[in-house]
Image (cartoon, helix red, strand yellow):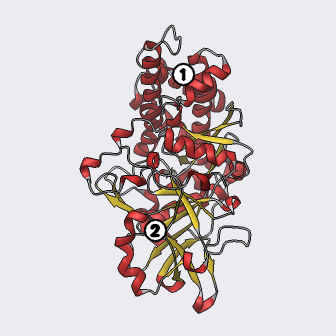
Amino acid sequence: MQAERMGSEEAIQQLPESLQMLLQWERRHLHKIQSFQKLEYDPGFDVRYFPQNCGAFPLPCFWIPRRAVVMFGDEDAAPDEFPLSRGCGATKKMLFPIHPTSLGHYSQLLSEVGAEDARLSGLLIWAVPTSSTRTLLAWPDGKPELALFFKTSLHSPIFGDRRLGTRIVARSVGTSAVLCHARATLPPTFSCFPETTGMIPRALRDSGAIVRHLPGDLQRGAVFAAPLFALLGGSGEREPLLLTMLRLASMEPLRFLNDILIAPYAKMWLHLAMKNGMLPEGHGQDFLIGLTPELRPLGKFFYRDFEGMQVDWDLRRARRLPAPANLPNAFQWHLTYETWGDPYGQLLSYKYYFSLAGFSDLVLHEIEESLMEWRAEGLIAVACLQKGLLVRMFSEALRSSLHDMFDLHLGVGSTFEASRVKFLVALLALRRRLLSSVRAAAQE
């Protein structure tokens, strides 16, 4: 949905090139935008805040008394970090970000707690919406090196209920802490955007916010990172990133996709799942591909949004992987960490299936569809492209990696392509074997 552009593009120029490019991909390379921006569901929503319509705007932020906020994770930033708090003891206050379209929702709370507009104390914070309208890249004016993300609460029929309640905030911060605490055990091709801090007003327990940090090499501009949907999104002057990368690489498209995306992702996913017990949500918004400033693949992936990360806790405990001593909201362990709240969310088989199917159905299927369109338009030359080919390639990459990493030989009928159910059965059997081996070794 296009509208009159709002905000400042000039302020965005404060950011390093890596973050400017990230915002370009987040705002100008959206894929199938009509599927998640359905204004007819909420005609009153201010579409100027859709990412494609919006530059940098002053983000409403308020200093709220610490006693009025439930905090999870780190609440005191270092002197060289984004200022999240000020004062100490009884006078301590926390900086609370609010999406502009939600200001009315918070008005009574702000009045009751005596909140102070941060701009009145000289703190101007620029913000730019990402593909997830409620998640904003933000930085203090003139201090782009402090840039981070605020994931705010938003509730509109367009997006559904995107408010951040206690369970979601605690889960996100806690799961991020688990993964980052065991960083040394992660695959070398995987990095993440840590979610270190969560805050929830005591009087509005369903309307919190999460602080998400940038990986250091991306913040410094050493690498670029593009969300996977940007491979396909864009038109006119904004060429889909995959077409640009194919032209630069001068490689056959299917081989290129296998080498830079499909095979590396399969190996990374198996390492995360079977060695770390971490099951990421594999769609094109949550995963980003690492690139050089010249847009050449680095063989590295970045993950963001820990609300969607599932955990195989038994596997992690059996492997004695390090974890923080106290996780947020741990007294409600089942509701916070074991399930998403739906009837199947606690099932291990569901967690594994959902993670795998996200990449297969929401990334590879979309890429394949775009390849066919580009071939029909004469933009690429692919001789043997056919429906289901990319999933077949992913299936082969999983089979090959299972053999190399775990000495598991899958039969023809048990591959991911042939039967997802049989593949899942084989995968969970491997998990049981690994657990038995680890437990036996611990008893010796």
Query: Which image quarter: residue 420?
Result: top left
Query: If the image is split into quadrants, where does the N terminus sit?
Result: top left
Q: Earlier in the sequence, mark 1 or mark 2?
A: 2
Residue 58: image x %, image y %?
A: 52, 65
Q: Nearer the viewer, residue 178 or 203?
A: 203
Disc 2 designates what residue? 98
Whether residue 434 appears in this view of the structure is: no
Residue 321: image x %, image y %?
A: 65, 55
Which mark, by number, is residue 396? 1
Q: Nearer the viewer, residue 57 or 99?
A: 57
The amino acid sitting under disc 2 is: Ile
Q: Secondary structure at mark 2?
A: loop
The amino acid sitting under disc 1 is: Glu
At 44% from the left edge and 38% from the top edge, which residue is drawn? 358
Say whether residue 53 is left or right of residue 139. left
Circle 2 residues within 10 Å: few <14, some 14–19, many ≥20: many
The correct choice, above or below, for 394 with respect to 339 in the image is: above
